Each structure stands twice: as structure tokens, then as C-alpha cells.
Amino acid sequence: MSHDTVYQRLRSHLAYLKLPAAAEALAGKLDHAEKAKPSYTAFTEDLLATEVEATERRRLAGRLRFSHFPVIKRLEDFDFDAQPGLDRRLVEELATLRFVEEKANVLMVGPPGVGKTMLALALGYRAIEAGYRVYYTTAADLAARCHKAAIEGRWATTMRFFAGPQLLICDELGYLPLQAEAASAIFQVVSRRSEQGSVIVTTNRSIASWGEIFDDQMMAAAILDRFLFKATLLAITGDSYRMRAHRERLQQLREGVAATLER
Ligand code: ADP
Ligand code: MG
């Protein structure tokens, strides 16, 4: 049997087994092996590693697409010095993703612009990289989706959808006051997920004022009870990062003007 025939059969095996990256790389790797003479084991491992890497990349891309992240944020880019009041060790502990493993929640509280969304997305990205399914939504969108689902008779499917991901990011709770129906939808999502998966909630409202977010003290208490049962509180109290950057810019501008006038 000629070499070509064995080669062709090997290629068709790889195609049949749906290992396209290995099939693609085969000719090049064989050429290289002629010279480098790796062991059989090393050659096989190297060929299959090509496929494993391609599969991992594809799955990561799939989880990213699914996540609906508005933007990719990385923890490495978070400027902790700008936020001295933030418990950095707590953020690093969260970044180990033990909270996802334990199906625990995270509540990020702070005024606008302090990096709540960035931190939630950065932790979410870590989770996606680690192989978890993550889904991002704002509280307003979540409520609107549930409302639409109820009208269209897809309530159960939608509840199942929001219960599915191992980590749900519910951003901007409290930016808009929620009607009773919206509050009830959030309550149901949070209840269904409790003990099943994690939720990161970001909000600009202190826990004390949740009664106003939901316009219903009982509902607020019920949601808090479920949510805080197993939750880490991350308080970010500092200055808005953008305002800080603006102020620095302004300061530089002033210094520049002053320097020009002195000349
Ligand atoms: P919030 O959700 O608390 O309103 P964001 O996360 O949207 O704030 O932050 C506003 C902008 O400033 C974003 O572009 C974010 O990436 C950036 N930002 C905020 N805090 C930091 C920080 N500590 N380091 C780097 N960028 C930051
Ligand atoms: Mg935000």
C-alpha cells in the first residue's frame, strides 16, 4: 500500500471523526516530522492538541456570543488605585470563581461610574474563560423580556432560559423604578436560580432603599431574602472613574494654559 493511500485514509478518518483542525494541519505536521523525527507519542499528541485548541477556541467564542456582553472588560485593566475604598482582596477572591462553583451571589453597590459594570463583566469574562455559561442583561431588559414572554405565552420557556446559565449578570438594578409585574419577574428569576446558579447584581441603590426600587416593601424583602441568603457584598463608594479622568484632563489643561501664559 502506497504512502499516499495511507495518508489519504488518515485524512478521511480525521474528517469522518470531525477533527477538521487536525486534518488541516496533518500535511504540515508530517513534513515537519520528517525532519524533526518526534516520537510516535509526541507526534500524536501534537496533532490532537491542534484539534483540542481549535475546539476550545470555538467553544469560548460560542460562550462569548451567548453571553450578550455589551463589551469585553478585563480585570487586568481595572485600576484599583483609582478606587482605594474597594476591597481588592475581595475582588481577587471573587476572581477565583469559587462563588460560581458554590452558586453564590454577588451584590455590587455604588454610585454611577465607579466601575460596577466593568467589574461584573470582568468577573463574567473570567467565568466564560473557565468554561462557565454566563449571561448579561440589565434589570430593565430582564423585566421587559419577561413581560413580553408573559404576553406571548412563553413565560415558562423564558424562566427556564434565565435559570440556565451558571452565572447571570443583572446590571443596573434601581436605575429605573420597577412596576409590580417587573419586580415579580425579577423575584421569580432570583428564586429559581437560588441554589442553582449565581447572580451578580449591580445597583446604585443601597439595600435600605430597595423598597423604593420595587415600589413594594414585601417584594423587596422577599427578593433580598432569597438573594442575600448566600451573597457577597461589594461596595464601591469612590469617585466616578470618568469624572476622575475628566478632572485629571481638566487639570492638565489648566497646567498647560498656565505654562503657556508664563512663557
Ligand atoms: P458603573 O457601572 O459603576 O456605572 P462602569 O463600569 O460603567 O461604571 O464604568 C464607567 C467607565 O469607566 C467604563 O468604561 C469603565 O470601564 C471605566 N472604569 C470605571 N472604573 C474603572 C477602574 N477602576 N479602572 C479602569 N476603568 C474603569
Ligand atoms: Mg453600569
Image (cartoon, grey):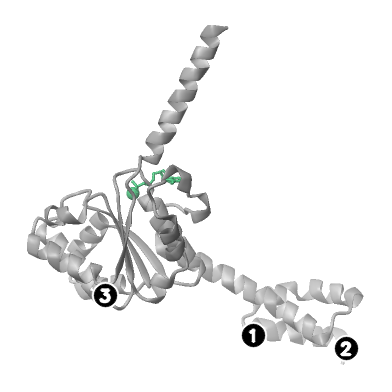
Q: Which of the image's four quarters has the C terminus?
A: top right
Position in image of residue 78 (x %, y %): 48, 49
Q: Are marks 3 and 1 in contact (CB under 8 Å)?
A: no
Q: Earlier in the sequence, mark 2 or mark 1?
A: 2
Q: Position of residue 147 (x, y in %)?
A: 18, 62
Q: Is residue 236 visible?
A: yes
Q: Earlier in the sequence, mark 2 or mark 3?
A: 2
Residue to which mark 1 is pinned: 16
Q: Residue at x 50, y 70 (%)?
A: 130
Q: Amino acid at mark 1?
A: Tyr
Q: Residue at x 50, y 19 (%)?
A: 255
Say which amino acid is labelled 2: Ser
From the image, state whether disc 2 or disc 3 is nearer to you: 3
**Where is 30 relative to 211, above or below?**
below
Between residue 192 and residue 246, name the one nearer to us: 246
Tell me where residue 122 appears, x and y as whole percent: 45, 57
- Residue under pointer 2: 2
Give the Cα separation between the discs numbered 3 and 1: 43 Å
Q: Which residue is disc 3 drawn over?
A: 194
The residue positioned farthest toward the right in the image shown? 35
Locate residue 7 relative to residue 147 in the image: left or right: right
